[in-house]
Image (cartoon, rainbow, N blue to C red):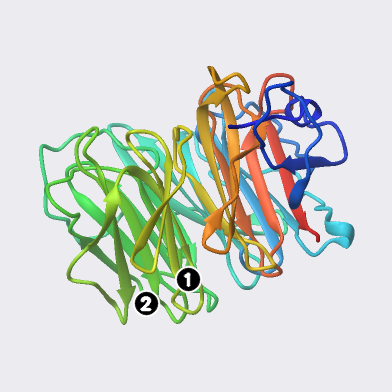
Amino acid sequence: MVVELNAFLGPMVKGLIDVITPRESNLTDFIPLNTIGTHWIPQAVDTEAEIAAGSVDLSALHGNTVAIVWSAQAEQSEILLTTGSSASAGGEVSWTQPVNVSESPNTSTDPQVSTGPDGRAHVVWREKTGDADMIQYSVCKDGMCTEPVVMSDSDHACPSTGEATDQWQADALDIAVDQDGTVMVAWWETASGIQYVVTPDPTTGESFESGCISPPGSATTGHLVIDDEANGEFRIALDAGGVGTSSVWLNQYKDGNWDAKWLQLGTGHSPDLEASRHGDVGVAWCDGQGGVHYWHDGESTKVADTTCVGPPQLATDNTGRLHLLWHSNAVETVLGDTVVRDVLYESIQQGADWSAPAIVANLQGPSDFSVESDEGGMLHLARTAASGEPDLQYAFQIQYE
């Protein structure tokens, strides 16, 4: 059962928005409730142009830098980036003016960003050139970005797993930077397998390793996400299989090699991955029959029965509690009825259990979002807007007792 707080669901114009603990009630939709220990504090972000659907990504893991990247809806879509310091006084982030990362006459879409230990923002995206797509890369700091480098231009051809096509899946591209600055980029080409690049600095072309990972089974495309651990080690999670029969899989890159066998975690789609510096790994995903699952240390738990539309997001706060957020298109009222509405839910791990889902925000139709914790455990959230809000919404979260 989910209960909402009225001020919590309107446009984010107040200085403080409480995340609430839903409780059963037959009296009213809006009741005073105790919080579970967190606040979301919103800030406005200047986007300069309308945001393309499904294009927001955020990174805050390294270098006290928060970076948000998105695709702007213009005559030719362009990739824009804004950054700020997560160590600002009072937690407020001072944002830079958006910078055009792609600087190209071609259509650029599907950006992903990861911050490095030196505070630089590493950005990858797809660029349409004629009948082909390229994976482009640039690194930015202080409002300046390097000239884009083509990451997909390599002599390493992946074995075909089906009929070739020029169709790309938007969520089959990701980037991660570890604490030593090593960069990994991975993408899944339709019918051509999963390609990856590992390098200390993609802008120099030195120590450039590229290769392929054979996907599990006979899958030709799916959702893909990577995360860094330490010392050049990375994890990859993906879904593979047919509609309604998809499974979630996990693999590890270590000492220059991928594990020979994929680890199957469960049935579902759209996984997210949280890997710690100590080898601790958690994966969350959507259940094809409804609900959200979390896997850790060989065990899978169903976190909630509410519908899950797209990739959930995991982040750990400074108290060590794990936060799970996901997009749902249904809300159950206090009378037991189901209302069709796009909302963003949050659940927090408490020991072996998870808190009841709380509504973080209203969304306007299918919407994307991104959440990550910084080195100090502060949580950062970026999402596209609901009706009546600016195009891009940002909030950070403060833990208290």
Which residue in the structure is indicated by mark 1?
Answer: 201
Residue 134 coordinates in the image, percent (x, y): 35, 45
Of 137 and 119, nearer the camera is 119
Q: Is residue 191 left or right of residue 337?
A: left
- Does the image show residue 40? no
Which residue in the structure is indicated by mark 2?
Answer: 207
Location of residue 89 with respect to 217 vertically, above or below? below
Q: In the image, what residue occupies the spot 19% across and 36% down?
A: 242
SS of the residue under disc 2: loop
Location of residue 125 with respect to 121 vertically, above or below? above
Give the residue type at disc 2: Ser
Residue 90 coordinates in the image, percent (x, y): 88, 58
Q: Is residue 254 left or right of residue 142?
A: left
Location of residue 126 with respect to 231 vertically, above or below? above
User: Which quadrant: the N terminus?
Assistant: top right
Residue 80 coordinates in the image, percent (x, y): 61, 41
Q: Is residue 267 left or right of residue 373?
A: left
Of 125 and 379, nearer the camera is 379
Give the residue type at disc 1: Asp
Q: In the image, what residue occupies the spot 78% across and 32% down?
A: 12
SS of the residue under disc 1: loop
Pointer 2: residues within 10 angstroms few (<14), some, or many (20+)?
few
Residue 256 coordinates in the image, percent (x, y): 29, 78
Q: Earlier in the sequence, mark 2 or mark 1?
A: 1
Q: Are marks 2 and 1 in contact (CB under 8 Å)?
A: yes
Q: In the image, what residue occupies the spot 20% across and 51% down?
A: 193
